[in-house]
Amino acid sequence: MIIPQRLFEVTRWLRIARPQYRKGCGPACVVSAFNYLHGMAITIDQALELWDFEGPFDDIDFGVVASNDRMCAWYDILCLHYGVEGVSGRLVKLQGLTKTTETIEKGLSALLRAIQNPGVMLIYHCLNHYCLIVGYEYTTSTPSRHCHGLDPDTLEVIYEDKREPLWPDDLWVILADCSRGMEPLRSLPWTSIRDDLLTEPPFFYDTRHPERGRLLKTQSGKFLSAPSESLTTRMVTRSGASSHCILYFSHGNISF
């Protein structure tokens, strides 16, 4: 399967539930995914009531209750209530008991195929935030390189006369955000998302603020700039696996 050099699914973006409630990125993203996949226009308030939340919704700390499994459960509840089929789960998770692939390359391959599929909506779980993936672009090294597409299975770029390996630094992932404090649309290099998904607690990488570099989460829950790798290796005991991942939502059984 050959996919385009760039893809932006405008319908995905048009279904974004924005703005969200305070710390309500998780619920807003699930509502966005549901509305896109099933052609509906339910509101965040309607969904929260179905999920047994009680108002005022501005007073709820959704960050405490949102999780990867909870997001999938919320989607299941919406599908059941409205009588539609839907499946969800982890598409790309690079560590922990629930990791989905042994290699970064397989994760990237699955991501590209999923973005290409109009029957899929993707939610990116990053540091203390959820947002939606609505497209990608692969930027060639020079204007004279004419790209005919990408092969997600081999991770090769197809040019007029040959194939070349896809350079991860040149792949941009387009994100849509439900938070009024963030840009409606923005892009991240795949390498930033990769670094986030590979970073193990108590270290974290904030893709919303990459200028902060590698962070260390303290016992009080604060994030501080991490010292050098060699120093922190001696100082810190690693604690489990990161929950950061890319979740998929679809309206039927699907394989990646």
Image: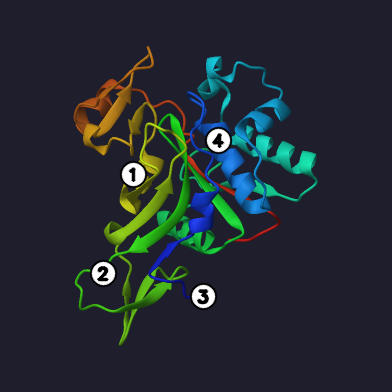
Look at label 2 and name its amino acid.
Thr
Local crowd size for mark 4, using a 10 Å CA cut-off: few (<14), some (14–19), many (≥20): many
Tag nearer the camera, 2 or 1: 2
- At horizontal 46% and vertical 45% (from top left) the residue drawn is 94
Residue bearing the label numbered 2: 140
Q: Is residue 126 left or right of residue 83?
A: left
Q: Marks 2/3: CA distance?
A: 20 Å
Indicate the secondary structure of the residue bearing disc 2. Answer: loop
Indicate the secondary structure of the residue bearing disc 3. Answer: loop
Tag nearer the camera, 4 or 1: 4
Look at label 4 and name its amino acid.
Ala
- At horizontal 59% and vertical 46% (from top left) the residue drawn is 33
- Residue 199, image x and y in percent? 36, 37
Query: Between 173 and 194, which is closer to the camera in this rendering?
Result: 173
- Residue 202, image x and y in percent? 37, 26
Local crowd size for mark 2, using a 10 Å CA cut-off: few (<14), some (14–19), many (≥20): some
Query: Between 126 and 214, which is closer to the camera in this rendering?
Result: 126
Q: Marks 4/1: CA distance?
A: 25 Å
Q: Marks 4/2: CA distance?
A: 34 Å
Residue bearing the label numbered 3: 1
Q: Is residue 30 visible to the viewer in this orientation of the structure?
A: yes
Look at label 1 and name its amino acid.
Asp
Instruction: Kindly identify which numbered label has been placed on residue 28.
Output: 4
Verify CB contact (< 8 Å) between mark 4 and mark 1. no
Q: Earlier in the sequence, mark 4 or mark 1?
A: 4
